[in-house]
């Protein structure tokens, strides 16, 4: 069981990436918590929290499609290396500005925007590069789940450390640690042994390839439905994190330690979800997992918004974190399983756009709405929207099964019945396939 759970780590390149990125992501979460708390400490403004979240994520909405085209054209390992180097430079500038006393809120917004531009290229490249790090493509689903567990393991550790360090030494320590942590993942990427990818033939103009990728994604109902669902959840639900400092400080009457604890609870639920997904032996049934998890996420954030008790708030955030990560990781796995290899970068860029790119629009809206009607009604409305989106996705699952079935047969995920022995009953798609 243990070997099955971590089978993707048998691939040397993925093992290197997993180790290096695990260290780097702890620093990333520490910086994110420190930036949010610093903005709230300096301004006390829900709107400015939304602005910072918007600045850090809107570049993905604008630039990710272009990044997807480049990921399908260029060496993904080299692209990933450069995005990590630039991210380290951004973290170093942030730390230096804080330590010299020059850091102001507009600097934080500008540096968040810079990091957002870097991530707009990093995320689709990294998502599409996962398959190249694996010795066996059969381990793709496990690798995606382990990659998500790595993110959420860091999410479990990073906010807790940040809360302690902010309270004892200030936000600057978190910025310094994040800048140093990038060396781990940069070293890991340099140590990889990746076979040269076969050069693509008949390249078209960038805009034509972008149009081709969008047409492919939205012309195939399973991909389109997944993108629409994660886009809706990212717009209406995931921006709940923007309001965390307000819940920690005003609703629960705490400080940076409570803020870190709330984020840690959400991370614990997300980590549990990734371990569950890593233990699955097949992609069959992921459609139902996605629709159920969307409802679970909605219930979690609605419950959190209504709770004024710390223990209950932590419980609901754990539930919400489990639901959110199950939706995102399962959607990622399903997409990467059914997408054509030569369009992988472009489809994953659209997935990044739906997940990361929609969140800033939601962050800005959540900050604005919460400033007018309060944080609790704002989160309730977002939870209801996620519940509706999950129900609409569930309604499409039977039609999606029919379209995905031939792909799974071709890949060997569903055994093909011997020729001449197929009956009408045998050709019926079993309900657990999607």
Image (cartoon, grey):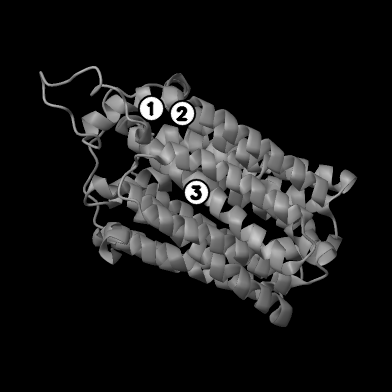
Question: For mark 1, what is the residue?
Answer: 401
Q: Residues within 10 Å of mark 3 (few under 14, many from 20)?
A: many
Is 328 rendered above or below residue 147? above
Q: Is residue 41 left or right of residue 184?
A: right
Image position of 272 with respect to 125: above or below:
below
Q: Secondary structure at mark 1?
A: helix
> Considering depth in this image, is 11 or 187 the residue closer to the camera?
11
Tag in front: 3 or 2? 2
Image quarter in which the C terminus is found: top left
Which secondary structure lies at badge 3?
Answer: helix
Q: Which mark is in front, 3 or 1?
A: 1
Q: Is residue 334 above or below residue 147?
A: above
Marks 3 and 2, how far apart at CA: 17 Å
The answer to whether residue 193 is left or right of residue 124 is left
Q: Residue furthest bottom?
A: 168
What distance separates the C-alpha of mark 1 from that of mark 2? 6 Å
Dot placed on the residue nearer the N-terminal end, 3 or 1 = 3
Q: Quadrant of residue 419?
A: top left
Residue 244, percent across and down? 73, 59
Residue 386 location in percent, x, y? 64, 39
Task: Decide which of 295, 270 is in the foreground and name it.
Answer: 295
The numbered dot on residue 384 is: none
Q: Are marks 1 and 2 in contact (CB under 8 Å)?
A: yes
Q: Is residue 142 left or right of residue 65?
A: left
Q: Which residue is mark 2?
A: 397
Q: Position of residue 22 (x, y in %)?
A: 44, 65
Give the residue number, with chain letter if any, for mark 3. Answer: 326
Number of residues whose C-alpha sits closer than 10 Å to that of mark 1, classed few (under 14), some (14–19) or many (20 or more): many
Residue at 70%, 81% in the rendered image: 169
Q: Are marks 3 and 1 in contact (CB under 8 Å)?
A: no
Label 2 CA crowd tier, 10 Å (few <14, some 14–19, many 20+):
some
Tell me where residue 19 appears, x and y as whole percent: 38, 66
């Amino acid at each position: 069981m243990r070997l099955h759970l971590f089978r993707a780590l048998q691939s040397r390149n993925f093992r290197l990436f997993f180790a290096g990125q695990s260290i780097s992501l702890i620093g990333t979460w520490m910086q994110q918590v420190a930036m949010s708390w610093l903005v709230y400490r300096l301004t006390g403004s829900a709107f400015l929290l939304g602005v910072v979240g918007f600045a850090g994520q809107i570049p993905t909405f604008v630039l990710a499609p272009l990044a997807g085209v480049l990921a399908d054209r260029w060496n993904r390992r080299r692209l990933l290396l450069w995005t990590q180097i630039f991210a380290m430079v951004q973290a170093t500038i942030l730390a230096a500005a804080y330590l010299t006393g020059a850091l102001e809120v507009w600097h934080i917004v500008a540096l968040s925007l810079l990091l957002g531009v870097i991530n707009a290229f990093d995320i689709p490249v990294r998502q599409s590069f996962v398959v190249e790090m694996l010795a066996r493509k059969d381990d793709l689903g496990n690798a995606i789940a382990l990659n998500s567990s790595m993110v959420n393991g860091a999410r479990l550790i990073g906010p807790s450390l940040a809360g302690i360090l902010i309270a004892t030494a200030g936000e600057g320590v978190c910025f310094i640690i994040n800048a140093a942590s990038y060396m781990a993942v940069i070293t890991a990427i340099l140590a990889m042994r990746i076979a040269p990818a076969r050069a693509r033939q008949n390249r078209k103009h960038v805009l034509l390839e972008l149009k081709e990728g969008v047409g492919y994604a939205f012309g195939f109902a399973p991909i389109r439905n997944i993108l629409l669902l994660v886009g809706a959840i990212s717009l209406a639900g995931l921006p709940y994190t923007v309001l965390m400092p307000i819940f920690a400080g005003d609703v629960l009457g705490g400080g940076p330690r409570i803020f870190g604890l709330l984020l840690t609870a959400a991370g614990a639920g997300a980590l549990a979800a990734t371990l569950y997904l890593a233990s699955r032996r097949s992609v069959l049934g992921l459609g139902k997992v996605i629709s159920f998890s969307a409802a679970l996420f909605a219930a979690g954030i609605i419950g959190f918004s209504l709770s004024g008790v710390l223990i209950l708030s932590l419980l609901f955030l754990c539930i919400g974190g489990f639901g959110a990560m199950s939706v995102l990781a399962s959607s990622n796995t399903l997409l990467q399983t059914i997408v054509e290899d030569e369009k992988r970068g472009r489809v994953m860029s659209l997935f990044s756009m739906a997940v990361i790119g929609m969140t800033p629009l939601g962050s800005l809206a959540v900050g604005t709405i919460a400033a007018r009607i309060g944080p609790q009604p704002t989160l309730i409305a977002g939870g209801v929207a996620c519940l509706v989106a999950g129900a609409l996705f569930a309604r499409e699952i039977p039609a999606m099964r029919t379209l995905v079935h031939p792909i799974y047969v071709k890949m060997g995920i569903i055994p093909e019945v011997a020729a001449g022995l197929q009956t009408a009953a045998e050709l019926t798609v079993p309900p657990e396939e999607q």
